[in-house]
Structure formats: structure tokens, C-alpha cells
Image (cartoon, rainbow, N blue to C red):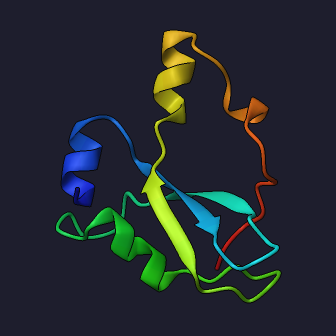
Amino acid sequence: MDLASMRKHGAHSVEAICQRHGCGHEAIVNVDGWPDDMPVPDVSLKLRYFRCGGKDIKTIPDWSHRRLLMGCGDAAGRSGSRTPLK
């Protein structure tokens, strides 16, 4: 999936998850200004988790806004701390 397709389906952010052993922190990254033809997994190539320095990051579409709009849970209830990425 590329960012244009993701946006077409209503997501404007990706969930970035640090894959470094023992870290696992997560962040939500808005990608509205990113190129439409960029594949969602390739967003991770431009990110680094600032606390541990990890560059092994998995990116997936952030569908949490859809769950909130539909009343099916909330983003605050998900596990992992939301620490900013650079």
C-alpha cells in the first residue's frame, strides 16, 4: 500500500514501532506532507527512534481514528508508550 491509497481510505498517519530488541516503543507519525507514491513500509527508512537510536522501525497505517469515529475503542488504551521519533 502506498501513502495515496492509505489516505484515500482515511488514514493520514502511520504507526511506527521500534523493532530494536528490548525497545518496542511506538509513535504516531503524520505523513500528510510525504509523497503519494511512497510505500507505507518505506516511511520507516526515514525514521529513527530518538531514545534508543533504533532504525529498525516497522510502519503500518494508523487506523485508530477510524476506531474512534466508529466508537470501537480508543487509541489511549493501546499498549506501548508514544515517544516521538525523529
Q: How many marks?
A: 0
Residue 79: percent from the left, percent from the top?
A: 77, 43
Residue 54: percent from the left, percent from the top?
A: 68, 85
Instruction: Give the camera-side residue of 9 and 57.
Output: 57
Residue 16: percent from the left, percent from the top?
A: 57, 62
Q: Quadrant of residue 24?
A: bottom right
- Residue at coordinates 80% horizontally, 84% vertically from top-left? 52
Q: Quadrant of residue 81?
A: bottom right
- Residue at coordinates 64% horizontally, 73% vertically from top-left? 19
Horizontal side of 20 relative to 30 (left or right) equals right
Residue 86: percent from the left, percent from the top?
A: 64, 80
- Residue at coordinates 75% horizontally, 63% vertically from top-left? 25
Q: Does 25 sit above or below residue 77?
A: below
Q: Does 71 sit above or below residue 82?
A: above
Instruction: Give the camera-side residue of 69 and 20.
Output: 20
Horizontal side of 83 relative to 14 (left or right) equals right
Which quadrant: the N terminus?
bottom left
Please identify the residue farthest to the front as the structure is shown: 21
- Residue at coordinates 57% horizontally, 14% vertically from top-left? 72
Horizontal side of 83 relative to 54 (left or right) equals right
